[in-house]
Amino acid sequence: MTQPRAFSHVDTWVFDLDNTLYPHHVNLWQQVDARIGEFVCNWLNVGPQEARSIQKDYYRRFGTTMRGMMTLHGVRADDYLAYVHKIDHSPLEPNPALGAAIARLSGRKLILTNGSVDHVDAVLARLGLVTHFDGVFDIIAAEFEPKPAAQTYQKFLDLHAVDPTRSAMFEDLARNLTVPHQLGMTTVLVVPDGTKDVVREDWELEGRDAAHVDHVTDDLAGFLRKLPHPK
């Protein structure tokens, strides 16, 4: 059995945003999910049940519902993003423990998300993590091609001059770690801690035992604290 990749060589730390930098059970994404359903409902003039089916079909096929709506129905990304990210961020609370754990990591810290910079800014402000990251690569920088598309990771690596063989990627969806692992990244899957109900599709919670997942944690701050101190 192949040993999971380690962290001693890592100088770039890459984090997803939603359900990764804050706990799944906050269910912030549930608000976005509901707004997406409303958008699909209104744009396609269909009922909520049909809209839900279309939304989830596009999410699985295209990586984001937005990409499906753009590709098949001519939706403008700006309109979509402005609508679906108009949510209440107040369920998020400051997380100084996570901030301290991220601060002690040696090297750059970057965010790679299928969300927008505006959404990132709002989430980081609520978590008290604004000063802890050196850059954000969002869906607009990706030219609206979401993870897990291989070209999106390559654009991210090129734009931020990241060596994937010296990087670690933290994600809540196992499928979004396939390409990073192929590129040489150390991969970490962040999962619910099991103490509270979460609103997720079954497939979103799969992949803990996948070969492309080096590590699994239900406590990101605790996991980061246990990594060796930089010399």
Image: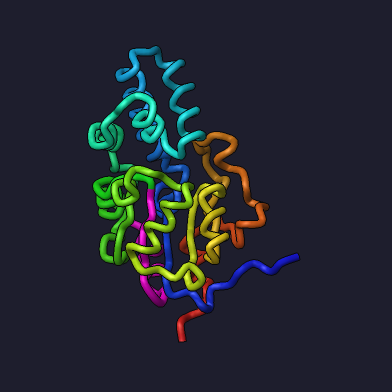
Q: Quadrant location of the N terminus?
A: bottom right
Image point (29%, 43%), residue name: 90
Q: Where is residue 62 in the image (x, y as percent from the top left)?
A: 46, 36
Q: Position of residue 119 (x, y in %)?
A: 28, 46
* Magenta stretch holds residue 66: no
Q: Where is residue 118 in the image (x, y as percent from the top left)?
A: 24, 47
Determine whether 83 is above or below 216 in the image.
above
Determine whether 31 is above or below 157 in the image.
above
* Magenta stretch holds residue 112: yes
What is the total number of numbered labels drawn onto the structure image? 0
Determine whether 64 is above or below 176 in the image.
above
Residue 108 appears in the picture as rendered: yes
Q: Which segment is the magenta one?
A: 93-113
* Closer-to-camera residue (8/102): 8
Judged left or right of residue 190, residue 140 is left
Image point (34%, 65%), residue name: 160
Which residue in the rendered view is the most extreme toward the bottom?
A: 231
